[in-house]
Amino acid sequence: MKKERKAYIESCKISELTEVTLGGFRQKILIEAHTEGLPVLLFLHGGPGFPAPFCAGARGLFPEITKKFTAVYWDQLGCGINNYKLNDGFNLARFAEMAAELVRYLKERFPEAPLYLFGISYGSALAAYVAEKVPQLIAGAVTAGQIVLPPMLSREAFAAVAASSAPIKTKRKIAALFGKELDLKEIALLSKTMRKYTNAYGIQDKSSPMENPFREIFASKDYRLRDKIACFRNGYRFCGELLKELGRIDLRKTLAGVRIPYHIFGGELDAVTAVRESLEVAEEANNPLLRVTVLKGEGHVPTARACAQIIDELERINV
């Protein structure tokens, strides 16, 4: 771990790995803030089962956030520091209830501080459900790569593959999937092809600890070797029903009826969760609490620049 990171950790008034019970399971969360009394920001990561970069191994890694917010990093059950062999009994509702329990815990611990959610990709679905469950406890939410309808099944996704340099045989296989409910092998083929041959996920800056965080995260003393491995290979391998459920998801009604300030940031190039879907929901809902911003040149995974814009929006909401 770099000296600057160690020094920053030591300067923080709050920097702790603590245990909470969520869904009946003891789970670890990282809480970090440079000063006391800051608003609380709970990160809900994507995947499902991919906790980086805002994970329990990120202590001292993002001072641009923890100088403004009390950041809460939770490796959702089944991955990272909370790896666990899941089964098909774990669904979106169960994870949303765990997230709601975490919100309740944080409000008890920081009763005077406003609490915000930051959901990324799969975590955006959890953010929408939690905002519906406990709106009285949440001051606002921001999301990147908001799930509205099943990921990777939009017309934008299939158009991106068709226009890519993927092999003709692969393109034909994928084109035949349009409009179908996919099985796990078909989901894996579509995801792999989009990652390899399109810019749908975005182009990452390998020098940025936010966009390419693994060297810094793996330097964390909070992570054991098995926790590092579980950032990639983890209990979600045994939970195929969750992916199938995402293949049927429809959050249009949930998002249209949000009762807290809810700001969606969608990448212009994102074909994984097409921002068009969010724009259509917002236009039809005419709900002043629901806003959508299109990020020019961005894909599905937010860059450091996009995250800075999102954090700025949270500060604006908090004024």
Image: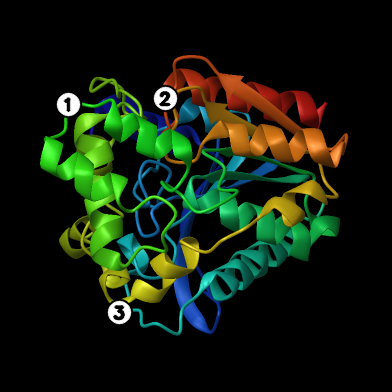
In the rendered image, residue 71, in percent from the top left (x then y), is placed at 56, 43
The amino acid sitting under disc 2 is Thr
Q: Name the residue under label 3.
A: 85
Side of 129 where 92 appears, left or right: left
Q: Can residue 134 be seen in this view?
A: yes
- Secondary element under disc 2, as helix, strand or loop, is loop
Please determine whether, in this image, residue 259 is positioned above or below residue 92. Answer: above
Q: Earlier in the sequence, mark 1 or mark 2?
A: 1
In the rendered image, residue 254, in percent from the top left (x then y), is placed at 74, 56
Q: Earlier in the sequence, mark 3 or mark 1?
A: 3
Q: Mark 1 points at which residue?
A: 165
Q: Mark 2 points at which residue?
A: 303
Q: Nearer the viewer, mark 3 or mark 1?
A: 1
Please determine whether, in this image, residue 297 is positioned above or below residue 147. Answer: above
Mark 3, Cα crowd under 10 Å, few <14 / some 14-19 / many 20+, is few
Q: Which residue is drawn at 22% across and 52% down?
A: 189
Q: In which quarter of the image is residue 33?
A: top right
In the rendered image, residue 256, in percent from the top left (x then y), is placed at 79, 47
The quarter of the picture where the N terminus appears is: top left
Counting labels gives 3
Q: Which of marks 2 and 3 is nearer the N terminus?
A: 3
